[in-house]
Amino acid sequence: MKQWHILAYDVRDLKRLQKVHYYLKKRAVPLQKSVFLLHCSAADLAQTLQGVRERAHLREDDIRLYPVSSPHSIWAAGQQSNAVQGLYAGKTSAAPEPGVMDRLLKTLFG
């Protein structure tokens, strides 16, 4: 079952920043420069997080993942792209099962 997540990052090195951004642009919807919306299965999420982990430096960079019940539960103001506006208005899948994210993040990040 696919679930929604927001992934945000603060990568302090320009080269790593570009690598993380380019990697995520292929797998998620950019909401802001360093904020992406993902809609994927647990396996795809694990693969995406592993890819981000390989491109970032976990002692210097800050990467955060937040589960979201659906894009229309996100409050937004200001200018958004048409693709993002469509996501906010659409109907989406249910919230993640309890404990799934905790296990996945512990496996990936210790």
Image (cartoon, helix red, strand yellow):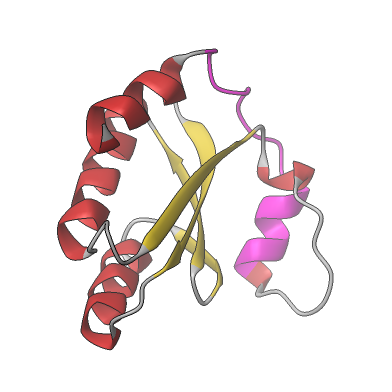
| Residue 23 point in image, percent of width and height | 26, 66
Q: Judge left or right: residue 93 versus residue 56.
A: right
Q: Is residue 91 magenta?
A: yes
The outermost residue toward the front is 59
Image height check: is 24 above or below 100?
below
Which residue is rendered at x = 24% and y = 63% of the image?
A: 56
Q: How many marks?
A: 0
- Please name whichever residue, 97 or 57, is drawn nearer the observer in this view of the structure: 57
Quadrant where the N terminus is found in the figure: top left
Which residue is rendered at x = 50% and y = 31% of the image?
A: 3
Residue 61 falls in which quadrant of the image? bottom left
- Please name whichever residue, 3 or 17, is drawn nearer the observer in this view of the structure: 17
Which residue is rendered at x = 45% and y = 29% of the image?
A: 2
Quadrant where the C terminus is found in the figure: top left
- Please name whichever residue, 98 or 10, is drawn nearer the observer in this view of the structure: 10
The outermost residue toward the top is 98
Q: Is residue 71 magenta?
A: no
Region in magenta = 83-98
Which residue is rendered at x = 73% and y = 52% of the image?
A: 88
| Residue 17 point in image, percent of width and height | 31, 77
| Residue 19 point in image, percent of width and height | 23, 74
| Residue 48 point in image, percent of width and height | 27, 47
Q: Judge left or right: residue 68 versus residue 96.
A: right
